[in-house]
């Protein structure tokens, strides 16, 4: 008897859960300053549409902690409405059968998104995720004073780049501000590959993982260039966080830094103005190409009809021009779709938008390898291990190429 | 009388059974699940498709795994060895009936009260060439002084040893001190009457009688070494590059950030095997010598 009543209570409780599932639960790790503000904006929009927003924020570890929490939820059969997942990880989750179809909300997305982007958001031709923003990774950030003293010319190839680095050295500053963490090493590496090999080579080597391209002399030359860059980095760089390296460029201790446009958020937060305190330029040789890093929300399988409605509304809200504008102004990135009011964006962002549009047309819009947009996490991890090892040992470029080819076969 | 007798029998069992059940499920049960996972196709999520020993083949083909295994060997040996020696020496010195012993003991034992994260961060700042020791000594005038082990890929693992020893040798000292206090003073007096010098007494009588203490200290330090994760994460983050990687970090990254749950599980099983390989002979030897005595 007692058992029965307990079972009944459990049943009622689970029914109650199902009935209140109209709420939209979103897992993310945007908990700091500008990012938290951006999420609050999304919450406001969803509540205006009559949905109940349930925040599922897991801070820490650049999303590692959030992914662990998410796995536990999905395995126990209780996934959130949406979760911040990006790149080929979307495909990995879809392959596990965890994601739901949001085609209904995405009728005109094929027209709004460049193909390189919509491919990432789809699994077997169906939209399963909604893109939030676009970060450009192939930026070079330069301290304006140091640049002016060195002649004021932004380097457009690696000869000019190293000439400028030598001048910075002569000024007594650290020429290249860098943080010796594997993902930052990989960020520099991909910009070098793109600069030396061009968008097609980059795509063959680091996106399609074509062994011929990976083993080519261009790749060896990329490693040679990376080795030369290494000599302009101070030895304390090991383990330094990226924002500390950005701070070096800001306060004139460092000359320049390879980093994505989230670095701009740091400059803006310190009231630095582009063109006056710092310059944003495409990494040497990459002015006509664009490595994108896109944050997105993957949509999970939800059963209840009203929950599905909430999910579709969420997808629509994410892609709306209003949200894209507010969110990206806070986050330092650019909108993923056209038709957004550009008035409030700064010079670097406007340049990024123009380049995003033009490279999408020429096909030199490529997925960022270092930021998990190009290849599955297992393969990426193995290749980043090679790059990090190269940066932190006296491994020869030839050996690095061999190791990279081997790592690219990791499944 | 009768009731009391029977309650003596069932009460301890009843009290212990929840703990027993919990450890059966949460320790041994999960060990079994991990072993099972290491033989499957698991990627992002657990997947029970049988894969045979493929995950182990992948693991043994991975350079990074061997780097981490080598680091564990270096770290484990030096960490346990130096902690034992330093702990024993401090314990013997403290045992000379000196003044302020209680105060000194607390000082040596205090690092144990810190978490490895705190230790790791403090030593990270101390050992950072641009921030800590090297900079200070250079500012004092010895400008050619360099101590860059933290950022030197060949030396980084030794900085982990330094921080680990700093943290744990006080603990070894406490156990040795307790052991020293337990040595029968009659034997020492008898040895003195026979004309043995103090070093000889330590070498021939006292240290050999500390054998069980050596065993417990080694046992505890060995498992701290094998599962060490937080200290390395805080101190070097496994870097520069992957130069100071250890198996626990390898396991964490492969299981949870790279979507290679199968390989991660295989490396966890290898860690378990290492512990078994170290502990079982030790425990066996100790049990046997106990019986002989």
Image (cartoon, coloured by chain):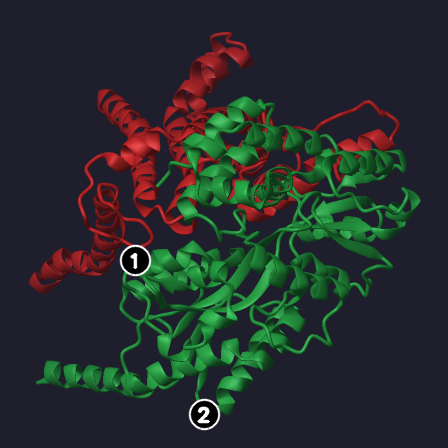
Residue B199 lies, in percent from the top left, at: 54, 13
Residue occupying the point 53% across, 38% down: B238
Q: Earlier in the sequence, mark 2 or mark 1?
A: 2
Q: Count neighbours of disc 2 (C-alpha within 10 A) and say few if under 14, some if 14 to 19, many if 20 or more.
A: few
Query: For this view, does A248 lie left or right of residue A214?
Result: right
Q: Is B218 drawn above or below residue A288 in the view shown?
A: above
Q: Colour of chain B?
A: red
Residue farthest to the front? A362
Which residue position holds label 1? Answer: A95
Question: How far apart in space, not on screen, are marks 2 and 1 (Cα)?
Answer: 32 Å
Q: Quadrant of residue B182?
A: top left
Q: How many marks?
A: 2
Q: Is B53 drawn above or below residue B211 in the view shown?
A: below
Q: Tag 2, which secondary structure?
A: loop
Residue farthest to the right? A149
Q: Which mark is residue B111?
A: none
Q: Nearer the viewer, residue A308 or A119?
A: A119
Q: Are marks 2 and 1 in contact (CB under 8 Å)?
A: no
Residue A90 lies, in percent from the top left, at: 40, 60
Q: Which chain is painted in green?
A: A
Residue occupying the point 30% across, 58% down: A95
Q: Provide the chain ID for the residue under circle 1.
A: A
* Residue B169 visible here: no
Which residue position holds label 2? Answer: A50
């Amino acid at each position: 008897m007692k058992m029965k009543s307990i079972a009944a209570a459990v049943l009622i409780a689970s029914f109650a859960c199902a009935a209140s599932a109209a709420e939209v639960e979103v897992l993310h790790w945007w908990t700091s300053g500008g990012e938290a503000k951006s999420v609050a904006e999304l919450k406001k929009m969803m509540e205006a549409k009559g949905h109940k927003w349930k925040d599922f924020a897991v801070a820490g570890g650049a999303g590692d902690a959030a992914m662990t929490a998410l796995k536990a939820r999905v395995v126990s059969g209780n996934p959130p409405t949406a979760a911040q997942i990006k790149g080929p990880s979307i495909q990995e989750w879809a392959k596990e059968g965890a994601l739901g179809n949001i085609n209904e909300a995405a009728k005109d997305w094929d027209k709004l998104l460049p193909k390189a982007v919509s491919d990432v958001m789809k699994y077997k031709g169906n939209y399963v995720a909604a893109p939030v923003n676009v970060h450009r990774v192939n930026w070079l950030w330069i301290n304006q004073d140091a640049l002016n003293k060195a002649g004021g010319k932004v380097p457009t190839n690696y000869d000019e780049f190293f000439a400028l680095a030598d001048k910075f050295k002569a000024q007594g500053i650290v020429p290249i501000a860098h943080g010796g963490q594997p993902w930052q090493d990989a960020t520099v590496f991909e910009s070098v590959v793109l600069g030396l090999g061009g968008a097609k080579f980059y795509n063959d080597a680091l996106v399609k993982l074509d062994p011929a391209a990976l083993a080519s002399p261009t790749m060896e030359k990329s490693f040679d260039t990376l080795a030369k860059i290494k000599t302009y980095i101070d030895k304390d760089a090991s383990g330094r966080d990226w924002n500390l390296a950005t701070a070096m460029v800001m306060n004139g201790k460092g000359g320049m830094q390879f980093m994505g446009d989230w670095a701009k958020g740091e400059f803006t937060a310190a009231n630095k103005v582009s063109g006056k305190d710092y310059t944003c330029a495409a990494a040497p040789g990459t002015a006509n190409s664009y490595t994108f890093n896109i944050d997105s929300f993957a949509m999970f399988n939800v059963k209840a009809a009203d929950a599905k409605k909430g999910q579709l509304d969420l997808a629509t809200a994410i892609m709306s021009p209003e949200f894209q504008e507010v969110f990206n102004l806070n986050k330092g990135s650019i909108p993923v779709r056209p038709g957004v009011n550009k008035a409030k964006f700064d010079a670097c962002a406007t340049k990024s938008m123009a380049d995003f549009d033009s490279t999408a047309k020429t096909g030199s819009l490529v997925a960022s390898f270092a930021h998990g947009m190009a290849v599955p996490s297992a393969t990426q991890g193995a290749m980043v291990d090679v790059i990090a090892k190269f940066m932190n040992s006296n491994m020869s470029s030839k050996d690095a190429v061999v190791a990279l080819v081997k790592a690219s076969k990791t499944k | 009388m009768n009731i009391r007798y029977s309650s003596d029998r069932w009460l301890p069992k009843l009290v212990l059974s929840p703990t027993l059940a919990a450890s059966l499920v949460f320790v041994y049960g999960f060990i079994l699940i991990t072993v099972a996972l290491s033989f499957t196709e698991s990627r992002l999520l657990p997947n029970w498709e049988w894969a045979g020993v493929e995950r182990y083949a992948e693991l043994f083909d991975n350079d990074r795994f061997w780097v981490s295994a080598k680091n564990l060997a270096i770290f484990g040996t030096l960490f346990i060895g130096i902690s034992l020696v330093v702990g024993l020496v401090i314990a013997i010195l403290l045992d000379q009936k000196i003044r302020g012993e209680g105060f000194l003991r607390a000082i040596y034992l205090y690092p144990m009260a810190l978490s490895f994260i705190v230790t790791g961060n403090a030593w990270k700042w101390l050992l950072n060439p641009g921030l800590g020791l090297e900079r200070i000594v250079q500012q004092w005038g010895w400008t050619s002084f360099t101590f860059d082990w933290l950022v030197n890929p060949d030396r980084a693992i030794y900085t982990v040893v330094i921080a680990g020893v700093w943290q744990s040798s006080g603990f070894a000292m406490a156990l040795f001190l307790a052991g020293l206090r337990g040595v029968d003073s009659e034997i020492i007096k008898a040895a003195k009457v026979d004309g043995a010098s103090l070093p000889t007494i330590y070498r021939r009588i006292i240290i050999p009688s500390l054998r069980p203490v050596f065993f417990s200290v080694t046992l505890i330090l060995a498992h701290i070494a094998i599962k060490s994760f937080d200290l390395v994460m805080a101190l070097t983050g496994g870097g520069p590059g992957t130069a100071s990687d250890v198996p626990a970090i390898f396991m964490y990254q492969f299981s949870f950030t790279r979507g290679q749950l199968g390989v991660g599980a295989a490396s966890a099983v290898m860690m378990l095997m290492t512990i078994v390989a170290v502990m079982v002979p030790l425990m066996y030897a100790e049990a046997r010598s106990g019986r002989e005595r």
